[in-house]
Amino acid sequence: MESLSEILEPYKDYVAKAAQLLTLVQIASPIPVFYGMSKTKSTNGMPSLMFLLITVFTALGTRFSVLINDDASFNSNAIGLALSVVYVTIFYYYIPAAEKSAEYKKLFATIAFIVGVLVYSEYEDPEKIEHRFGLIFTALFLGFMILPIMDTMRAFKEKSTKHMPFPMIITGFFVGLSWFLHGIIIQSGFVIGQNALMLVINIIQLSLFVIYPSDPSTIKDQQPSKKKRNKKAD
């Protein structure tokens, strides 16, 4: 790994800038969704979980980047955190009155979790905090990956990719690849491991777009035609 890091070292700045730019593009992708909310004055039935998870992930990512002294990661996570706070604020502004109580409980639980982990990081042994915080951050990352894994399982079950957001998946692939390379350069096992997992999931998801159609009805339409051909042959 060290030899590969040495090979990529001359391209460190280029890889870091690419990773930051692609991450910001990915984080900014929900902007049209919130524009739609402002038009309809409603959350349009969209769940809050994704935006709360992004807030947690960027908040802890900002802290972790400080611990590993990684400016590229800090800049991406700090801007991402600012955007996610804006997202959550807009989302909760348009929540229907009947759902506010339950949704605000989720919000307060999210804030409490972030504050709790950040306070812990201030009091933990300085020699152990990077590794232990990295474990917490990785566990959170694995939890975040449950959503795309569920989408992938659903695609296998329904034999359709209709529900899968291709733009976000292809962007996620390049984001994961750039941070994977960046992790090799800075020799961070946590960064490498997290983004290697993201790449594997993204590759599986992208392959499903080749295997399955976006509209499962096309398969059903093809099956009767095959039966008719068989009858004609008989």
Image (cartoon, rainbow, N blue to C red):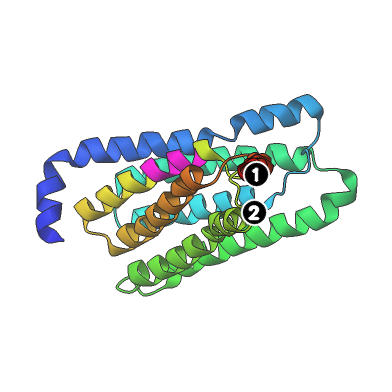
The residue that appears at 27% across and 60% down in the rendered structure is 188
Magenta residues, dominant SS class = helix
The residue that appears at 44% across and 53% down in the rendered structure is 204
Per the image, is 198 magenta?
A: no
Measured in 3D between alpha carbons, the distance from the residue under mark 2 to the one under mark 1, in whole angstroms, is 8 Å
Q: What is the x, y in percent for residue 11?
A: 16, 39
Q: What amino acid type is highlighted by mark number 1?
A: Pro
Q: What is the x, y in percent for residue 49?
A: 66, 53
Tell me which corner region of the image, top left, top right, bottom left or bottom right, holds residue 196. Answer: bottom left
Q: What is the x, y in percent for residue 41?
A: 81, 30
Is 22 left or right of 42, judged from the image as shown?
left
Please tell me whether mark 2 sits on a helix, a strand or a loop.
helix
Regarding residue 78, the answer to whether it shows in the image is no
Contact check, label 2 and label 1, Cβ < 8 Å: yes
Q: Which residue is mark 2?
A: 158
Residue 216, numbered circle: 1
Q: Among all residues in the image, which is located at the extreme top?
A: 39
> Magenta segment, which residues?
168-174
Tell me which corner region of the image, top left, top right, bottom left or bottom right, holds residue 102. Answer: bottom right
Please tell me whether mark 1 sits on a helix, a strand or a loop.
loop
Per the image, is 173 magenta?
A: yes
Regarding residue 106, the answer to whether it shows in the image is yes
Is 143 left or right of 206, judged from the image as shown?
right
The residue that appears at 41% across and 73% down in the rendered structure is 124
Q: Nearer the viewer, residue 5 or 213?
A: 213
Quadrant in the picture for the N terminus: bottom left
Note whether 40 is above or below 126 in the view shown.
above
Is 58 left or right of 13, judged from the image as shown?
right
The residue that appears at 52% across and 39% down in the rendered structure is 166
Classify mark 1: residues with Cα within 10 Å, few (<14), some (14-19) or many (20+). Answer: some
